[in-house]
Amino acid sequence: MTALSLADFERDALDTLTRYGTIPCLSPMFDDEWANHGHLDAAVALLADWARARRLADFDVQVHHLEGRTPLLTITVEATGASSGTAVLYGHLDKQPPLGDWSEGLDPFIPVRRGDRLYARGVADDGYSTFSALLALESMEANGTPHSRCVVLIEASEESGSPDLEAHLDALTDHLGIVELMICLDSGALTYDRLWVTTSLRGVLNVELTVRVLARGQHSGSASGVVPSSFRVLRQLLDRVEDSTTGEVLLDELRADIPEEHIRAAEAVASEFGDVIARELPVLAGVELMGSTPHEQILRRNWYPTLSIVGMGGIPEPAIAGNVLRPSTTAVLSFRLPPSVNSERAANAVLRALTTDVPSSAEVTLTMHPADGWVAPPLAPWLSEALESASIEAFGRPPAFTGEGGSIPFLASLAKRYPAVQFVATGVLGPDSNAHGIDEMLDLPTAVGVTNAVTTLLSAYAAK
Ligand SMILES: [Zn+2]
């Protein structure tokens, strides 16, 4: 079978992918006015038009609208082989915000190509997915390689935790039919030289916590020493959930035993790829890392609970900071949870810890958004072999398997919905791809490699 080349990808996908890169189609969490702004609709329309122009024998492009929810794009490609099940290829088109100023010459919404890398927000996370999924199918049909019925499913709420996906899946249950294979094109890679398969994802728990002590701010000369500081109360509350010396999360409900096979897999990755986690991070010289060996760092990133304070409110910028005792302090806590932890249970434990016997009886309010992690089910023998061939044919090297420290909440919900399904979570988010950060980049040869790997997987599925 003739594999897709970079030239093919450039000819068939690059113009539209670049136009997609210009659309500020932020996920709803980052754009309350998304429905009025229409950027998500513009992105769906662009991708749907591109999809309609594919050379496929029997396919249908639909944009699904549900009241008050983001749109969902499906491209249903009927089987050219005899298989009766459905393969779902998942991606998303909503984007993270720019995060900050991008480097000289780069801009989140003005795509720039440097060498074989395309820079713009959303091109790698996860704009390429529609193109990879459909170009894989197009190349199969051009080569006369049979494929099963496939539904390419592109949602628009992933970066907000996929709040709209369940409703769309409910509406599409009959249409999807018997789903046997799920290929998620939204995951990461530790190197660009092979296919990386994700074996676990951490869950996430976001908490917005506000501590209030005053109805309005007071001269600190008149109130301090008498009124407790909201920041100090916050600090005490945080000490209940995290050891501030070691960074260890203290609540049992947020911890999990690491399965033996995941410990061994991390060992294998550490011995083959070495310092693969730390060397990609822009750590300042002299800063000591948590986890002294590459093996420990992999496990820490993929299986340890952690707390990051990702936002603060109620605190003035330094330039306008007067001597005032503030009425309140707000912190946004982002917990990453071990893949096997029940996030609702974790949320209840955090709620108890932060609201019981509050120091100084300060007023505490919080909102929580838990989402489960995911542990990949065991691979069927046919899929295990197919992954091996897919990586060797597309990249010239065997695949590698690792957990991810990030979260893709919908994978957990899909796994619950389709317990017997085979999952492949893979993607292009490798070193310097900067998903969610500044200077997001798509490595084009990797996008082509992943596309070719999808071809091999779909071909093996149709032949099994
Ligand atoms: Zn993504």
Image (tube, rainbow, N blue to C red):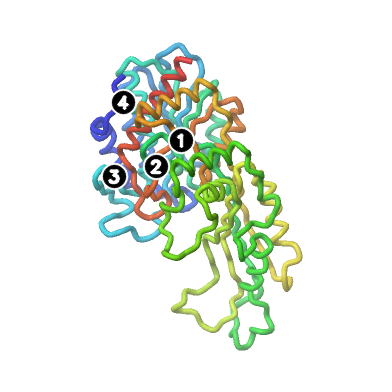
* 232 and 431: which is toward the camera: 431
Q: Position of residue 115 (x, y in %)?
A: 24, 45
Q: Are marks 2 and 4 in contact (CB under 8 Å)?
A: no
- Residue bearing the label numbered 3: 117
Identify the element where label 3 is drawn: strand
Q: Are marks 2 and 3 in contact (CB under 8 Å)?
A: no
N-terminal of the two: label 3 or label 4? 4
> Which residue bears the numbered disc 2?
191
| Sequence-first tag of 1 and 4 | 4
Question: How many residues crowd mark 2 within 10 Å: few (<14), some (14–19), many (20+)?
Answer: some
Q: In the rendered structure, which disc, 2 or 4, sits on the residue that comes first in sequence?
A: 4
Task: Estimate the spatial distance between the alpha carbons at disc 1 and disc 3, rounded to whole Å.
Answer: 23 Å
Q: Nearer the viewer, mark 2 or mark 4?
A: 2
User: Where in the figure is residue 357, as x and y percent of width and height?
Assistant: 76, 66
- Quick check: marks 3 and 4 in contact, CB under 8 Å? no
SS class, disc 1: strand
